[in-house]
Image (cartoon, rainbow, N blue to C red):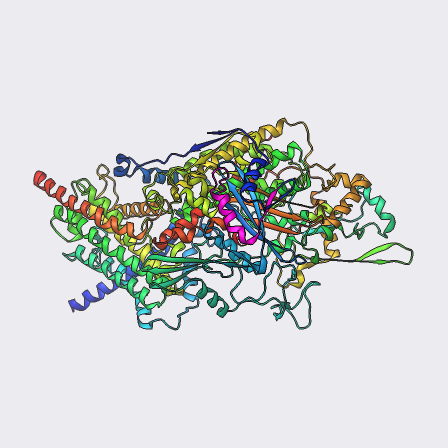
Amino acid sequence: MVRVKYVERPELSNKERILFIDFLKGMKVTITNFFRKTITTAYPFEKLTPPKRFRGTHALRVKNGKEPPSFKVLEKFMEIKDGESRCVACYMCQQACPVPELFKIEAVQLPNGKKRVVRFDMNLLNCMYCGLCTEACPVDCIIMTDIYETAAYHRASCVTHMEDMMKRAVDYDTRRYDEPDRIWIDDKERSKLWGQIKWS
Amino acid sequence: MELLGTIVGITIKSLIFIVGMFLAAAYLTLLERKFAGHVQQRPGPLHVGSHGLLQPIADALKVLTKEDLVPDNVDKFLFYLASLLAFVPSIMILAVVPFGEPFEIFGFKIYPYVSDVNVGLLLALAFGSISLYGVIFAGWASNSKYPMLGSLRKAAVLIGYEVALGFAIAGPIMQAGTFSLREIVEAQQGLWFIIPNILGFVVIVFSVLAETGRTPFDVQEAEAELVGGYVTEYSAMKFGLFPLAEWYIATFVLSAITVILFFGGWNPLPLLGWLPIPGFIWFMLKLFAVFMFFLWVHWTVPRYRVDQITELAWKVMLPLALANIFIVAIWIMIFG
Amino acid sequence: MQFSDKKTNLWIDKNKLEIVKKSFPDVKVEEYENAVFIHVKKDKLIDFLKFLKEAEELQFKMFIDFTCVDYPFHTPRFLGVYFLFSPEFKQRVGVKCWAENNSLPSLTGLWKGAKWAEREAWDMFGVKFEGHENLVRMFMWESYPYHPLRKDFPLEGIADTYLPSLNLRPDEIPAHNYSPYHTYVPSMEDLEETEKKRIQKKAQIVLNWGPLHPGTHGTIWFLFDMEGEVIKDCDIILGQLHRGVEKIAETRTYTQFIPYTDRMDYISALCSQVAFVNAVEKLLGITPPPRAKYIRTMMCELQRINSHLLWLGTYALDLGALTIFLYAFREREKIMDIIEGIAGIRLNSSYIRIGGVAQDLPEGALDVIRHFIKDFPKRLEEYETILTKNRVWLRRNVNVGIINEEQVYQYGLTGVVARSAGVPYDIRMIQPTDAYGEVDFDVPLGKVGDCYDRYLLRIEEMKQSIRIVAQCVDKIEKLKDKKFIASENPYVIPTLEEVYNSIESMVKDFNLRIYGEQAPEGEIYLSGENPRGELGFYIVSKGEGHPYRLRIRSGAFYNLQIFPELIKGRTVADAVVLLGSLDPVVGETDR
């Protein structure tokens, strides 16, 4: 139920004016904060661990036996060996993306009738990091890792290719595949800001 | 021969004072940044030297080696003169402020002040007023709209608060009977002058905040309104001299004058006279306490609008200072 | 005062339509499921609108929006659409009028708020307005030759200037979608010409406040005509951050457009997404599950606290209280950590989807939010101790920029600005969507209408938002149904679990991504309560996967329009205070 109420406007009384009580109370708050511990993280010497759902740079997962059931349906049309990316060239990520021009996916038809992906480029300078491509991929191939330090000196080095993305996914999975879907890892740096949280 | 000795002696002492003041001002910047940082729950400078102790040296090197841009259509003579005029008078006040009683080392009698003039307080006030010209020249010479607005505002504020300051210091002068700063301290060996002069103390606190350009009166640094005020067109060391002079050196010497006038100078605290601490150390402790108080106010309180500041100066501070003179006169009549 | 009736359909009802038809018999009524429009001819337009505004039984006093739609195969080509609101009877009406000879009579005689809306229509469509006092372009510079929102103007613009990249080695192309040709960039002469057409110098100096300035919240360009320190006249040049979001929407599907909505008002991103998704869901006829509704309400209110804290920090910083800025950002860090753990990114989180939310809450999210709820009211008290009774704060804020009720109706002011003048206009109360109908909260109102009232109102709104979040957390824990998106609906994209395990879901996913949500033909106008005002979406759909015309009615744009009126006769220092308390965000004023 919604109620409407008028706010009251406080006035300064004469005693408060003469004795500067409004200034002194404010200054007391400031000096209390002086004696508290600092809450900052001294980046780059200390870093916060990003949460599991963090949307960093993209990566392509490889065929390693942990694929979802939908992969078996689509793999009949593709030629993919173990250790290569699972991409089935369905172009769903490009269809779902708000900026479709950043993808460049090319697949060729081999003489035995199956397809093979030869090129998968993403121009990350145009990317919005929205995550719609990861929600569109039917075989859990394209994912977003927790790497956010991707500054470079040339525009050409901001375009990422299939080999780099496969390596990144293998690295990310070895570090964080088995992590549960918690809101964040409770490490020392986060408890500087938050204090101790009561987990249930 | 004696004249030559005196001249050499005074020159060496002045050099020691000036160099010491520069180093002190540099480390006062570090003190302010650490204080501001911890009030805002962050550490302040941390990496240059352990806990930031070499940060002022890094800052000084940076300001000295930056590219100095002088726009084409400024009035060059006044442009260069303005930054000097804002800075030199603050250092000159140091010439009349005493830091302690004369003491003996190795048989030599050392006077910890450059000179002891018997109108010292008047000279200090006069030197402080010269910096007004620096402000106006900076705004005029920059030949642009924002500096002009900023300098006119600051000039209006400074004029109002100089008058209030002048009337407020009349109270301790009446009680001590002299203009010389050293004799004012000696007259406070019984009772500190703050007790009858409480109204004068309030006026002096506000006047010092206005003279040195700290909130609630820093119309100069009103970044949101005027970008930089009269320092907009300055860069590198010419720019560096303005806040160094206003915020650090001027606050330091004006706090010294406040301590001398109201808190007993280098006399020890009323009940702790038996501690073997020399007067010089007491003076420094009190000075830092007053300096930190000004910093504390600066980092908490919002700022007034220009017409409200001048209204406050002429309608509130000046009557309070006159009332203070009245009260002190009655006190002298009663207590002799 | 209590409002317990939850009207979900705000459009004009049959009795009032009868009254309208009695006085003007030759108007046509166009009724959709979610909107009611009245067609009128151009020569009767001003009389008709005057009748709607002043008749006793109708009283459509408040101006909400004006826009144009382009139908290139119809003569006349442009259709002007007006939206009005009646605060007495709480009803909305839309009025349509074809612009014969590409011109319409100007509405500035009846509602002053139409001035900027008409400038924008001239800029984007090329429709002239007879009787407008200074018809200049709103977002583009004066000598720009095209009208961008027309259907024959390409999305990429006319790329005719050669601008090679700076770190290019000879004949190397950095990426596959790179082109060395660019659209034309305005020069200094173009900008000077724009400035001269806006304001004439009649007093001492003309001061350029902006576009790059630490005090204006973003790149807004003010022109002050000043005498000493007193401002005699003022005008505003917008468009430095204009990105053409409305044009982009005409080529993207509804789900692809969601990341663009949170880049408009980047500080309260989740609220904008929720308003857009509510409008699309109403058009498609989807009801999200209850868990999704509570999660959306909770995230919206957390985002509202976030936005008001940023406002408080920058407002206090502009006025000189330097520590409050950092204290407010300390609390903002906590909220952004919460949003990062739930959605993935701190600022432009595209978390809301059509039919629900993208993912369920992770483990531990409710514990963290409860910890935040317990801690936050103490901090809010600290800020109030420093500021609320401070004499400097009172002198700077009291009686500065007083807005009265008549100005609220004339200019279409919404949000905190309208509530400070005493008008109880809050969309959460009038047309509750999601779970706002099931939580208890208070809506604060001001009595005087000055900047101090707006400050007190925003602090009070933060306290009420914490109340709503606490109620939502309790309700989410008790809900047994764990569904967070209505994926059985034919318009809703299925979740990843469903796509991995069933072929029908995979085919549905493919269809919806390639062809878009084929919305039925129709139009809708729905709005949500942004922290800055009313954010409304007017969607015209012709049965395709992408909208035919998407109009974004932004609250910050109309709130900023009252600034030139209020600043006359005051000094530059008050300009800072006034601009801060109107709280514009340039991403939303310029879109």
Tell me where residue A8 sits by quadrant: top left
Of residues A153 and C232, the one nearer the viewer is C232
Of residues A193 and C319, the one nearer the viewer is C319
The magenta stretch is: C35-60
On whether residue A190 falls in the magenta region, the answer is no
On screen, residue C426 above or below C232: above
Residue under the image location 79 percent in, 49 percent down: A86
Of residues C484 and A163, the one nearer the viewer is C484
Give how far across and how far down residue B190 sits, in percent. Answer: 16, 40
Give how far across and how far down residue B146 sits, in percent. Answer: 37, 62
On screen, residue B143 above or below A103: below
Tell me where residue B320 sits by quadrant: top left
Tell me where residue C519 sits by quadrant: top right
Can residue C553 be spotted in the picture?
Answer: yes
Residue under the image location 30 percent in, 68 percent down: B81
Q: Residue furthest right?
A: A112
On whether residue C59 falls in the magenta region, the answer is yes
Of residues C88 and C473, the one nearer the viewer is C88
Give how far across and how far down residue C452 sits, in percent. Answer: 38, 42
Query: In which quadrant is the C terminus of chain A drawn?
Result: top right
Count of marks placed on residues: 0
